[in-house]
Amino acid sequence: MPGRVNASARMAAARAAAPVQHLSLYRRYGVPEPLQTEYQIFRMIHTQQRKLEFLGGRFAGKEAYLKAHHTGLGGIDFHDIQILNDETGCPYLNDKKAHISISHEKKYAIAFVVLEE
């Protein structure tokens, strides 16, 4: 029938008209922004599985950072490397010339670090 718009078309039009907003990691866990340390982020995680994924991803990220610097494990103290999350939940390092990507699936975690020259 002309003039009738189904619900999915209305929803698609509303999504197209509204600006894309990502749910902040902080809002997702219901804490005030911003979290300043990895430990604060870790404490906000409630499930054991998610905690293991978080720790595995952070370890992989720090190891990738050390390997990108050609220092290997022990070259820089793990406590000196901070991996935090921006307002959209994307990880970033406390080194402005380093970019990180972390992925995890149940028992496995992988991280990739690229250093700018």
Image: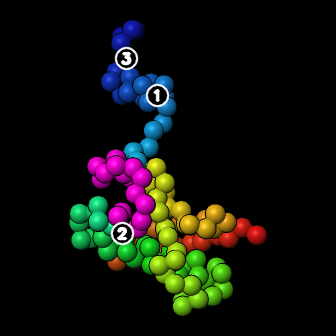
Q: Position of residue 90 (x, y in %)?
A: 49, 57
**Location of mark 2 (residue):** 39
Is the residue 87 above or below the residue 19 in the image? below
| First to last magenta residue range | 25-41
In terms of depth relative to the viewer, which is nearer, 115 or 13?
Answer: 115
Q: Position of residue 20 (x, y in %)?
A: 48, 36
Is the residue 107 above or below the residue 97 in the image? below
**Location of mark 1 (residue):** 18
State the mark number for residue 5.
3
Mark 2: give few (<14), some (14-19) or many (20+) Cα within 10 Å: few
Is the residue 34 above or below the residue 20 in the image? below
Residue extending farthest right? 117
Report the amino acid beneath label 1.
Answer: Ala
Whether residue 49 appears in this view of the structure is yes
* Of pointers 3 and 1, the one earlier in the residue sequence: 3
State the mark number for residue 28.
none
* Of pointers 1 and 2, the one earlier in the residue sequence: 1
Residue, x 76% and y 69% (percent of image)?
A: 117
Indicate how the structure is coloured in the image.
rainbow
